Amino acid sequence: MYADNKIRRNTLRDIIKLKGERPVVSLTAYTAPMASQLDQYVDFLLVGDSLAMVLYGMESTIGVTLDTMIEHTKAVMRGSQKALVVMDMPFGSFEESKEQAFQNASRALRETGCAAIKLEGGAAMAETIKFLVERNIPVMAHIGLRPQAVHVMGGYRTQGRNQEERSLMIEDAYAVQAAGAFSVVLEGVAETLAVEITKKLDIITIGIGASAECDGQILVVEDMLGYFPSNAKFVKRYAEVGQIIDGAIKQYAGDVKARDFPAKEHTYGFKPKS
Ligand code: KIV
């Protein structure tokens, strides 16, 4: 049903050279069927730790484990053929030391076949990013609103709205670039700051709640498909899939109760052996 290995998968080079050429298209994916459906339209798929909230109903991304991320990344690799796949490093899997980060990030690449990892953090993670890149692990950094830091940030707040935050974020952006990250996610960042960082950096900026001027965009696919009720300003809802599912399930429940399902065409006849 999924990969037949005939289509060439995007490489890091393919993504990197898009800067200044056209915006990079990306979405999250956590499962094989979703990856298969998104594959032809996106440049890369991110197996985001947002799956903790979207798939597992957790309150934040903090509770998801490395093993869970690896299993979902394997599924996304099986479901896709063309998109480059990036795995998010979950909370607690890379912050302790650069050696810990290498152990866990190398597991991600080795066990799943994905091409790169993403990790949250700016200047504070620069040494770790350098260590990984020098050991052949491509890194996408993630600055601005960092969901794994929700407790220290005091909630999911847009970042870069005062001069101090702006200066710190520009420092973060330069630090991850100097450390060798091939790209950086700018999440929940004031528009003018996202534009400034994108202009200043040579590496690709991927915006989510940032600016159309970023080098590319990402959204959680369930958000843009309208799976859940939400009024998040940065999300454009391209469909209302939650409502479609609700209508279908309501109809199914009614059919079962009325014994209208299964109908004749859904049942098997008896064929006596002659
Ligand atoms: O976990 C995630 O889905 C992410 C993206 C929203 C950037 O980090």
Image (cartoon, rainbow, N blue to C red):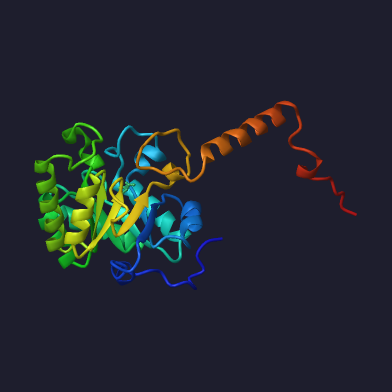
For the residue pair 106 and 130, the one nearer the viewer reads as 130
The residue at 83%/45% (across/down) is 269
Residue 269, visible in the rendered structure:
yes
| In the image: residue 26, left or right of residue 150 | right
Q: Is residue 228 above or below residue 220?
A: above
Residue 171, horizontal then vertical, whole percent? 10, 52
Residue 192, horizontal then vertical, whole percent? 21, 49
The residue at 50%/65% (across/down) is 3
Residue 85, horizontal then vertical, whole percent? 36, 60
Image quadrant containing the C terminus: bottom right
For the residue pair 212 and 123, the one nearer the viewer reads as 212
Q: Is residue 204 above or below residue 64?
A: below
Residue furthest right as drawn:
274
The residue at 26%/53% (across/down) is 185
Q: Is residue 49 above or below residue 83?
A: above
| In the image: residue 192, left or right of residue 10 | left
